[in-house]
Image: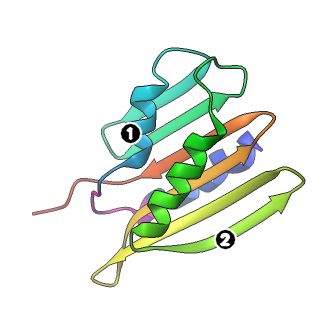
Amino acid sequence: MIKVIAIIALLSLPFVSFSQKNSVAELQKKYKNGNTFTLNFDNSLQILAVSSSSKEYSADDIKKLKKSIRRQDFEELMSIKNGKGQLQVHLMDRKGKPAQLIMIADNESEGFIALDFTEPESD
């Protein structure tokens, strides 16, 4: 699953060009200590991987993230379910151009991975 997400992440990098309030960054603050992997690359790529064995882990966090995305102007590009797991890809357009891409892979028994691709708005 992680290999699939990494490949999609690399292929998706050209599609980002604007910044947006970042729910993934908010989760990174919560999970900064524990059984997690976080990466914040120049504020354009943020990755959060949280194991269900992390003491801070809560399945409600991923539900809140998905709800937050639905409230914003994201379009769901893809949703794949496999047993208890799900992979979702969401894209936000601004002025006809891709502005932000968020991918979420979650499995209640294993944890979740959230990737957010953004770039500061160009002048």
Residue highlighted by disc 2: 78
**Quarter of the figure that contains the N terminus:** top right
Give the magenta part as a residue range: 14-20
**Quarter of the figure that contains the C terminus:** bottom left
Q: Cα distance, mark 1 to mark 2?
A: 22 Å
Q: Is residue 96 above or below residue 22?
A: below
Percent across and percent down for residue 81 are: 81, 61
Residue 10 in sight from this viewpoint: no
Name which of mark 1 and mark 2 comes first in the sequence.
1
Kind of residue at disc 2: Met
Residue at the far front in the pictured view: 60
- Badge 2 element: strand
- Badge 1 element: helix
- Circle count: 2
Residue highlighted by disc 1: 25
Percent across and percent down for residue 118 are: 36, 54
Give whichever of 89, 121 is nearer the camera: 89
Percent across and percent down for residue 83 are: 90, 53
Q: Residues within 10 Å of mark 1 (few under 14, many from 20)?
A: some
> Which residue shows up at 43% across the image and 53% down it?
117
Residue at the far left in the pictured view: 123
> Which residue shows up at 70% across the image and 46% down it?
106
> Which residue shows up at 39% across the image and 28% down it?
29
Q: Is residue 25 above or below residue 68?
A: above
> Which residue shows up at 62% across the image and 30% down it?
50
Side (left or right) of 21 relative to 35: left
Indicate which disc residue 92 carries. Answer: none
Give whichever of 28, 8 is nearer the camera: 28
Give whichever of 71, 3 is nearer the camera: 71
Percent across and percent down for residue 42 are: 30, 38
Residues at discs 1 and 2 in contact (Cβ within 8 Å) = no
Side (left or right) of 114 relative to 27: right
